[in-house]
Amino acid sequence: MLIRATVALVFGAVTIFWATPSVHVLAWAVGLYLLATAGAVWMARALPVAVPVVVALGGVGALVTQSDAGVALSAMLALLVLGLLEFAHGFRKRDMLARDWLVSGVISVGTAVLLPFFTSLGAHALLGVAGGGAIISGVLWILSGLTLRHDAKTASGTSPAAAPGASPEAVN
């Protein structure tokens, strides 16, 4: 989860700070983002293996087309598949991450649905939409990953209050 969050936040930062991106910057940024996201999703092993394959194919499609419309279509299809299956996974599972999967699915589907409406506005607009969705999902996944990490430490008996040097009031 933290790898996926990092991928999304790095991509989001690139989209924010690149003032006048060309269509080639758009294609490379979105293509590499989708490929890295596919790798992170594959490493998580929570979704069927077809999901990271489709996302990776979307990344390759973005790299190959090198056009606003091609990148938007590739990203739209990849994010739509990713989002729908994340949503279904969150709906089916009843674990600690179920809500996060649901929210991530909605973010991915929302980004996918918005992309075609911004195709005519060019690379800057497309990067803005894709980057906005990436930042929101990156924040979601980093909070989720850090929460799970904290909960795992607490469950193993190493609570922050029991740390050496903690005051007696902190333990009670």
Image (cartoon, rainbow, N blue to C red):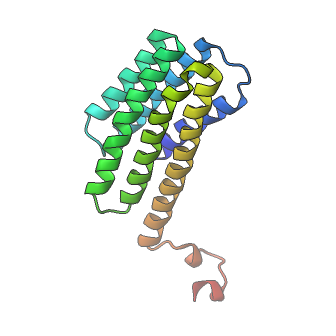
Residue placed at 54% from the left, 16% from the top? Answer: 68
Q: How many numbered marks are there?
A: 0
Tell which of 124 and 29 is nearer to you. Answer: 124
Q: Position of residue 23 (x, y in %)?
A: 60, 13
* 5 to the left or right of 19: left
Residue placed at 42% from the left, 37% from the top? Answer: 40
The relative height of residue 154 versus residue 62 in the rendered view (above or below) is: below
The C terminus sits in image quarter: bottom right
Residue placed at 52% from the left, 73% from the top? Answer: 159
The relative height of residue 45 versus residue 70 in the rendered view (above or below) is: below
Residue placed at 62% from the left, 21% from the top? Answer: 121
Tell which of 89 and 152 is nearer to you. Answer: 89
* 20 to the left or right of 156: right
* 117 to the left or right of 21: left
Tell which of 167 and 135 is nearer to you. Answer: 135
Q: Position of residue 29 (x, y in %)?
A: 56, 22
Q: Which corner quadrant of the image does residue 152 belong to?
A: bottom left
The relative height of residue 121 versus residue 11 in the rendered view (above or below) is: above
The relative height of residue 114 versus residue 162 in the rendered view (above or below) is: above
* 146 to the left or right of 104: right
Q: Position of residue 91 (x, y in %)?
A: 30, 56
Q: Position of residue 56 (x, y in %)?
A: 38, 25
